[in-house]
Amino acid sequence: MLVLSRTRGERVYIGSDITITVLQIRGNRVRLGIDAPPDVVIAREELCNKPVEQGQEPCYAAGNS
């Protein structure tokens, strides 16, 4: 795992086509902006952890973001 410290407005690049930008830091919350191609799945952890019986596709399924 890579651990970074960033301040507002700074970016992290993943490969040549994914950019993560720190938009806002307020208390212990951070707002991130993520630019990625449409075929890259981006999902919050709590959505990935939903039980399958609720009809939720796995968060890693193509096209689900």
Image: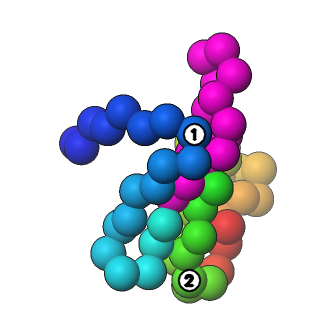
Residue 35: name its quadrant. bottom right
Q: The residue under label 2 is which amino acid type?
A: Pro
Judged from the image, the secondary structure of the residue bearing numbered disc 2 is loop
Q: Are marks 2 and 1 in contact (CB under 8 Å)?
A: no
| Stretch of the chain drawn in magenta | 20-32
Residue for badge 2: 37
Residue 42: name its quadrant. bottom right
Q: The residue under label 1 is which amino acid type?
A: Arg
Residue for badge 1: 8
Question: In the image, what residue occupies the spot 43% across and 38% down?
Answer: 6
- Is residue 60 or residue 41 the one in the foreground? 41
Q: Is residue 1 magenta?
A: no
Question: In the image, what residue occupies the spot 57% across and 39% down?
Answer: 8
- Nearer the observer: mark 2 or 1; the answer is 1
- Is residue 55 or residue 12 the one in the foreground? 12
Find residue 15 and report its horizontal and vertical position in percent. Answer: 32, 75
One can see residue 6 in this view = yes
The colour scheme used here is rainbow
Find residue 44 and report its horizontal and vertical position in percent. Answer: 62, 47
The residue lying furthest to the left in this view is 1
* Residue 22 to residue 14: above or below: above
Question: In the image, what residue occupies the spot 22% across and 42% down?
Answer: 1
* Residue 40 to residue 6: above or below: below
Judged from the image, the secondary structure of the residue bearing numbered disc 1 is loop
Query: What is the distance, in whole Å, between disc 2 and disc 1 at their CAs?
Result: 23 Å
Q: Is residue 29 magenta?
A: yes
**Few, some or many C-alpha atoms within 10 Å of disc 2 (few <14, some 14-19, many ≥20)?**
few
* Residue 63 to residue 3: above or below: below
Find residue 38 and report its horizontal and vertical position in percent. Answer: 62, 84
